[in-house]
Amino acid sequence: MHAVVARSAGGPEVLSLTELGDPTPGPGQLLVRLAAAGVNFIDTYRRGGVYPMEFPHVVGSEGAGVVEAVGEEVTDFAVGDRVAWASAPGSYAELVVVPASEAVVVPDELDLETAAALPLQGMTAHYLVTSTFEVRAGHDVLLHAGAGGVGLLLTQLAVARGARVLTTVSNPEKAALSSAAGAAHTIDYARMNDIGTELPAVVRDRTDGDGVHVVYDGVGAATFDASLASLRRRGTLVLFGGASGQVPPFDLQRLNGAGSLFVTRPTLAHYTATRSELEWRAGEVFRAAADGDLDVRIGARFPLGDAAAAHAALEGRATTGKVLMIP
């Protein structure tokens, strides 16, 4: 089979398409013929060495496809099943070994490319609005990168729960996509000289001076201070990623002085820690997409051999919606 291998920690140039032996599933595992793999920032963190990894390694963790073989002790899946997953190391490959505990069945009404676009970003958006901070009618929400994969999905979910969503974007085209997803206000931060002061001023102007109840920030270092300053008293900052770099340590007394604020750094694994929770989140997201209640935008598709270009586009913020790798 062919797979994308990161030879060492570094930029997109360390990725190469490599021929490897076909894997076999062990106990509790599935062997899946890949239909599409999701491209996510966590892949770039692992490739770049932000998250500790052994090198060389096959990149990727998300995808969808058809089961070709099952290992011993697997009772809930069979050859021919259509499955998707958010956490299976080595998913940028024609054949992927997926732990059965991480796989979920794809509804018949959902095509496999759409299914591959949903596990990580869809379930992330789901846990952010249902569990990390439970969005309700009347809440004001600020969301960074409103035209990104998580951003477009989270906006729709938050609006469906009755919230007013403000998003940040970097150009008019992304603003249009964010508005189409339901954002009440889009804010072009690319036109700002000092996002740390200008963005909070705009947010407060659009919330009658109060600020928002919650900020969902997947950008990190570049937006963290502005996010804190955009919150109302006892507001919550949900830092769920670091696309611009990781946030350095900061003085917790800042939370006190800014209005008894809350900050949390969640991750999907802790919100799908049980099989029932995984199936609940995946089931709700898949069903919403299958029924047409959740629009899933696939912004770019790259062949496996162009993995470096896919990573460069994602890190350069040249993409909207979901980026997929197609074998």
Image (tube, rainbow, N blue to C red):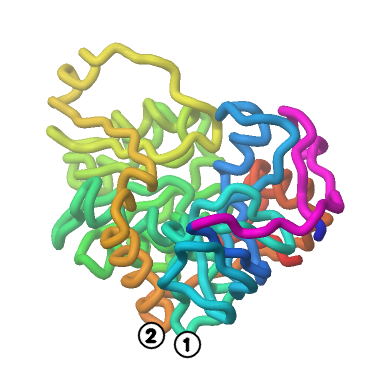
Percent x, y of residue 118: 48, 65
Which circle, 1 or 2, is nearer the viewer? 1
Dividing the picture into quadrants, the one containing residue 95 is bottom right
Q: Residue furthest front?
A: 72
Which is more toward the observer, 119 or 220? 119
Q: Residue at x 13, y 34 (%)?
A: 234
Give above or below for 232 relative to 67: above
Image position of 25 with respect to 271: above or below:
below
Q: Does the segment drawn in magenta span residue 7?
A: yes
Residue depicted at x 18% and y 46% = 208
Left/right placement of residue 230 relative to residue 152 reads left
Image quadrant containing the C terminus: bottom right
Where in the figure is residue 304, as x and y percent of width and height?
78, 58
Question: Label 2 near label 1: C-beta < 8 Å?
Answer: yes
What amino acid is labelled 2 in the image? Asp
Image disc number at residue 109: 1
Type of amino acid under label 1? Glu
Specify the quadrant of the image occupied by residue 301.
bottom right
Label 2 SS: loop
Q: Residue at x 67, y 43 (%)?
A: 316
When the figure is inspected, residue 73 is found, relative to residue 16, above or below; the finding is below
Is 256 a magenta residue? no
Q: Quadrant of residue 289?
A: bottom left
Q: Which mark is residue 291?
A: 2
Report x, y in % for residue 21: 81, 54
Range of magenta residues: 3-27
